[in-house]
Image (cartoon, rainbow, N blue to C red):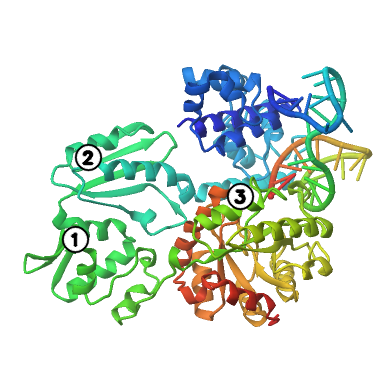
Amino acid sequence: MLNKEIAQQLDKIADYLEMEEIDYKPFAYRRASSSISELSEDIEEIYEEKGREGIEEINGVGKNIADKIEEFILTGEMEYLENLKAKFPVDLDNLLRVEGLGPKSIKKLFKELNVRNLSDLEKATKEGEIASLSGFGEKTEKNIREAIEFLKKDEGKWLLGEVFSDSEAIFSRLEKLKETEKISFAGSLRRKKETVGDVDILVSAKKAEEIIDCFVGYEGVLKTLSKGETRSSIRLKSGFNVDLRVVGKNSFGSALQYFTGSKEHNIKLRRIANEKGMKLNEYGLFKDGRRVAGREEEKIYSLLGLSFVPPELREDRGEVEAYLKGEELELVTQKDIKGELHMHTTWTGGAQTVEEMAKRGEELGYEYIGIADHTEFLRIENGLNAEDLEKQRAEIKEVDAMMKIKIFQGCEANILKDGSLDIDDEALEKLDYVIAGIHSNFKMDREEMTARVVKAIKHPLVKIISHPTGRLIKRRESLDLDMVAIFNEAKKAGVVLEINSSPHRLDLRDTDIKRCVEMNIPMIINSDAHHVDQLENISFGIGQARRGWAEKKNIINSKSKEELKKFFKSDEN
DNA sequence: GCCGTTTTCGGCCCGACTGTTTTCAGTCG
């Protein structure tokens, strides 16, 4: 499957062309890139079956881009891109990750100061060279310095969404082998942490050899870092590492417990084992030198006096103490989710129609979905005004009548700088519900920013606040908000806070969710899908909710559509 | 570079914001 790689290459071409200050071509390359990454078919198969014609049928791909795609399929390279790279030998990928830096600035920094990569850039900020460039100044230099610091903090960490597809592919390859008895993810991926350093997979088998051969033979491998008798590490073309460990079935449970972590959680467990005169390690739980548990994780926990602690809780945030007391949380699961209320369609930034989203919703077994497209302020996303919403309502009504699934109409209104919404109440009153979220002016001081969100919470028509902290993992810090004040106001107003499932957002954060659970503030898990496939991102949000100790009762989209309608009509706020 | 009931050339989603300027370029979504 070369779709992803080809899309990346085309995106890179667009980046370089933007540096060249060429108009419109970058747009064409990006459009082609995006329709290729949204293709469900394998582009190589299209090429094999239909040849060049098949490639040119792809939306946004004409003769020239088709040439480059064909070249890439045949040779693994695009000469055009290689030439562009040679002309501007800069680490564009990483430099573009610096918030506030775009292609034009990068070009200027390269030409004037010979900045080629992040460390050059950092040096230039420290020596004050940037402030003296025309068009740049003190503040820009300071912003760049801070943006680099921010990037560095998360170095080497990967988003769940970034590691997902390769990890699943490797997992299912290994799972199919006849030698594989049991298999599981371990480490931070199993704990559903928002970013992971690498991916850990654990297999139980009598013989490890075939399993390890299969592992290092995965098509996405860039380099085999190590390959031994019971373990192996690989680096993937996508950039992250995967570790595999193979153990006997008598140690599978203890190895899984050990390799799942977290370190802090495990230290506490081992301490408890010691207190009980036992010893816990990756090979088992031992008493008087005899293995008393190891095959099943559950048995280890139960012999230590705890009920089974779900992996998402294992962060030493009080779970050991709670489970020692016999507490057993019924964390929210996929099955509990009856629908969701934040998705976009072709009306604004989405890739699919109302009907297509509804169909996928049905396939996912949902009772209902809610369409929440952007409103007026977001011009780039073609934000809807009152009249557009009327037209959309007619379409939703029509599709709703056709289908089993219930389709609600909401919107995602923008919270403007002063805390007001970007669309009149009159238009909002006609909707089933209103989501409000921040999409602009991310830099305000804490007092102002908090007042801004609080004002939106108090708006009588607002039911849900989307992605409340506004952060983009690894890219943008959270808004400077007094979260306690937000929680208090949300509770008072009966406003629901969103757990946004986009792997880039995962917002609320796990610690915020835990706080909401403690304060009994209702939350909703939404995908914020802009494409039918992204509806399945909800699993990331569920993982996040579980990390925050959320149970079914804390999550409003575990409610039936009737209960939800009541909630829409309630005027607590 | 792509596209097409304004169709084979001329238009391409565009307004707000920031930091730099003194009227605007670059970035963001």
Q: Is residue A537 visible?
A: no
Separation of marks 2 and 1 at Cα, in angstroms: 24 Å
Return the residue at label 1: A281
Q: Residue at x 33, y 45 (%)?
A: A171
- Which labelled disc corresponds to residue A211? 2
> Can you give x and y, in whole percent of width and height, for residue A549 in the image?
44, 71
Going by the image, does A137 lie left or right of A524? right
| A190 versus A69 height, above or below | below
What's the residue type where badge 3 is placed?
Answer: Glu
> Can you give x and y, in whole percent of width and height, for residue A546 in the image?
44, 67
Q: Residue at x 55, y 50 (%)?
A: A534
Kindly indicate whether the residue at mark 3 contacts the one at mark 1 (C-beta within 8 angstroms): no
Q: Secondary structure at mark 1?
A: strand
Q: Residue at x 67, y 40 (%)?
A: A101
Which chain letter matches label 2? A
Which of A19 and A350 lies nearest the eye of the viewer? A350
**Mark 3 residue crowding within 10 angstroms, few (<14) / some (14–19) / many (20+):** some
> Can you give x and y, in whole percent of width and height, for residue A337 in the image?
49, 66
What's the residue type where badge 1 is placed?
Answer: Asn
If you read the primary sequence from the N terminus, does the residue marked by circle 2 or circle 3 appear first? 2
Going by the image, does A98 lie left or right of A453? left
Badge 1 and badge 3 in a common chain = yes
**Mark 1 residue crowding within 10 angstroms, few (<14) / some (14–19) / many (20+):** some
Which of A484 and A362 lies nearest the eye of the viewer? A362
Going by the image, does A94 lie left or right of A128? left
Q: Residue A239 is drawn in which quadrant?
A: top left
Q: Residue at x 74, y 60 (%)?
A: A414
Q: Closer to us: mark 1 or mark 3?
A: 3
